Image (cartoon, helix red, strand yellow):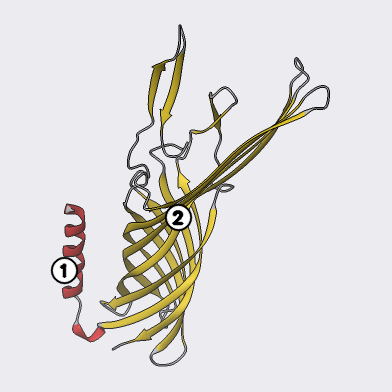
Amino acid sequence: MKRAIALITLLTLITNFYGQDHKSVKLSFNIGSSVSNLQNSDPAYRHDDYGRYIPIKTDLIKDVILGITLNGGIEYFINNKSSISSGLFYEKKGVFINYDSSFQSNITDLRYEYTFVKKIKNHYLTIPLTIRRYFFQERSLFIEAGFYGGILFLSQSYFKEVTYVQYGNGDPSTTEFEFRGKGGDNHTTKFDFGLTFGTGYKKAISDRISFISNLKLNFGLRKIDAINSNEVIYTPSGIHLTSKTIKNYYGLNSFARNINLTLTFGIVYKVN
């Protein structure tokens, strides 16, 4: 909260510093696509037939989830080259892990095939606050940087595990688990915040209307798990036996954070 107040105060001082002649307000509507994942999602786990935790290596590029993003924005120019930009954004964030493996046992002559699917889609309403800097005489190219805050309003999840065993005599055996979830999801942190960086291009169509394209990268700073912190719990199970439970974020690291890249196109209208 103190950081937010300091930022607002700084922006107010900057606004008052510049002359009145350059001040103008522009409104925009943008729509586009997004690519999202979770930073620091390792370790991820699946279970074997004996309930043991088997680690799976995640990939920041391979495990992305695609989505649509849209927003209504407002931009306030504080001089000919600089502006403050904000708005209301819809963004889908999450992760999509699709893991397959096979193994041939030389001892038991068994062939194992394993499929592991984990898809988590978290839907947010976010409000960014950035400072833009324009280049060239026509103010066509810009870069921006700032902060964002987001509220989770819907979470969807899909998990699937399939184990296929081919015995030496040719007989197969299949074990399958599948789950779908949808709701408010108390497991996911309700409020997300982080850093945002972007670049874009604006082309005037008329005196008041412009075309704009915007590429933006958002780094979350808050952990995704609202309940757990990778706690490991050992529980006695029979004589000289102990069961192990790892409490994390749906089998992913509790301290994972959102990261997403958006590419939008839209129309800008100059109010004054």
Q: Quadrant of the C terminus?
A: bottom left
Could you say which is closer to the camera, residue 257 or residue 5? 257
Query: In the image, what residue type sits under mark 1?
Result: Leu
Q: Which residue is mark 2?
A: 93
- Return the residue found at the far right: 169
Q: Is residue 83 left or right of residue 104?
A: left
Residue at (38% x, 22% y) in the render: 233
Residue at (81% x, 22% y) in the render: 168
Query: In the image, what residue type sits under mark 2?
Result: Lys
Categorize mark 1 by other alpha carbons within 10 Å: few (<14), some (14-19), many (20+): few
- Return the residue found at the far bottom: 207
**112 up-or-down from 223: above or below:** above
Q: Which residue is mark 1?
A: 13
Categorize mark 2 by other alpha carbons within 10 Å: few (<14), some (14-19), many (20+): many
**101 up-or-down from 23: above or below:** above
Element assignment for label 1: helix
Query: Do the residues bearing badges 2 and 1 touch, measured as CB atoms within 8 Å?
Result: no
Badge nearest the viewer, 2 or 1: 2
Residue 126 shows which numbered tag?
none
Q: Is residue 239 left or right of residue 164?
A: left
Horizontal and vertical percent position of residue 182: 44, 52
Asked whether residue 210 is in view, the answer is yes
Q: Quadrant of residue 146?
A: bottom left
Horizontal and vertical percent position of residue 267: 44, 82
Element assignment for label 2: strand
Residue at (40% x, 79% y) in the render: 139
Horizontal and vertical percent position of residue 223: 35, 43
